[in-house]
Amino acid sequence: MPEKTVKAGELQLWTEDFGDPADPTVLLIVGADAQAVGWPDSLCHGLAASGRHVIRYDHRNTGKSTLIDYDKNPYDCHDLARDALAVLDGYGVDAAHIVGGSMGGFIAQLLALDHPDRVRSLTLVATSSRLAGIVPALSGEASFFSPPPHADYLAHMAQVGAELTASPPATREELIEARFSAYAPLAGSTEFDLEECRAVLTHEYDRATNPWHPDASQHAIHATAAVGDLAPRLRALDVPTLVIHGTDDPIIPVEHGRALAATVPGATGLFVEGYGHVCPNAAVIEQLRAAIVTISGGG
């Protein structure tokens, strides 16, 4: 699992790859303020064992990649898509099978639309063509992001936000627990190892340049707000596409995934019963691995 830093303009992006570089490359793009290690190690190793060269990386402003002042240097998902291209360039990869989760799936759509020559296939996990409207939707306001996040999830996040405001976390343990309290409701209704989820969040905290970056998620969300609904452009997309979505996703409801699968010509939909938005169990990870291997089978 060699690590290396690649240049994206003036930025430095932390990356890691698995498997044989001579094999077809799968680029994993994580969501929002998550870090590269949010993609399970078992998925990365499983794909590598299946004959895929896997790359994962930290977005700007997360993990071990360059931290910037968003207010002075705002960016949007077009910039984040160019970061992904810089990662491919850093590994000398002309074209790759792109897998994006949540906001990473939105970035993956932009890659396929704006740089189709760099995309061999597209796997869109727990995402939508119209994330711009999620900013007001997450605040419980009227929005064209429809259907909106589940009401119980919004209520939980409002409670978490109030508790953090009243008693800001100060220690390592409190900071990790605060992040876990936001992640746990995203697991879905099937059996998930929430302690493994906590372990990943702990690893994120311990490896990050800035372990507590409370504005990072808002920066990521606003990066999508600058880009409109991609559905009109997706109707002409000519890239093999797989849409994977959990039926219990509380933040980007499954209807968004179904709409994506219906919009992209020839797209295949895989809707995983009981799966939420993050914290997949071993069985779900295996489904993801098998599905990605199948769509990337063209080399």
Image (spheres, rainbow, N blue to C red):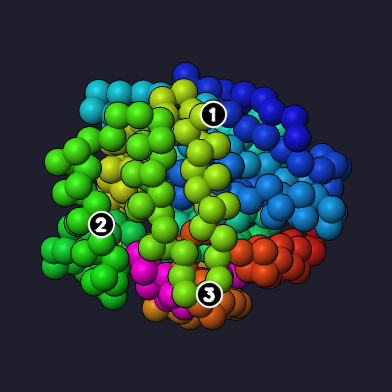
Instruction: Give me the residue at 61% from left, 25% from top.
Output: 6
| Labels 3 and 1: the sequence-earlier one | 3
Residue 65, x across and y down, in percent? 50, 27
Which label sits on residue 157?
A: 2
Residue 67 can be seen, yes or no: yes
Tell me if residue 246 is in the magenta stretch: yes
- Which secondary structure, mark 3? loop
Three-letter code for the amino acid on which mark 1 is drawn: Arg
Instruction: Give me the residue at 61% from left, 64% from top.
Output: 281
Within 10 angstroms of label 3, few (less than 14), some, or many (20 or more) residues? Answer: some
Alpha carbon of mark 3 to alpha carbon of mark 1: how far? 29 Å
Three-letter code for the amino acid on which mark 3 is drawn: Thr
- Which secondary structure, mark 2? helix
Instruction: Give me the residue at 71% from left, 66% from top.
Output: 286
Residue located beneath label 1 in the image: 207
Q: Which residues are magenta?
A: 241-254
Q: Is residue 53 left or right of residue 277?
A: right
Q: Relative to 129, is 24 above or below?
A: above
Residue located beneath label 3 in the image: 190
Three-letter code for the amino acid on which mark 2 is drawn: Met
Residue 69, x across and y down, in percent? 30, 23
Residue 81 can be seen, yes or no: no
Alpha carbon of mark 1 to alpha carbon of mark 2: how far? 25 Å
Q: Relative to 201, is 61 above or below?
A: above
| Labels 1 and 2: the sequence-earlier one | 2
Q: Is residue 189 left or right of residue 156?
A: right
- Which secondary structure, mark 1? helix
In front: 122, or 31?
Answer: 31
Instruction: Give me the residue at 46% from left, 23% from top.
Output: 209
Tell me if residue 182 is in the magenta stretch: no
Within 10 angstroms of label 2, few (less than 14), some, or many (20 or more) residues? Answer: some
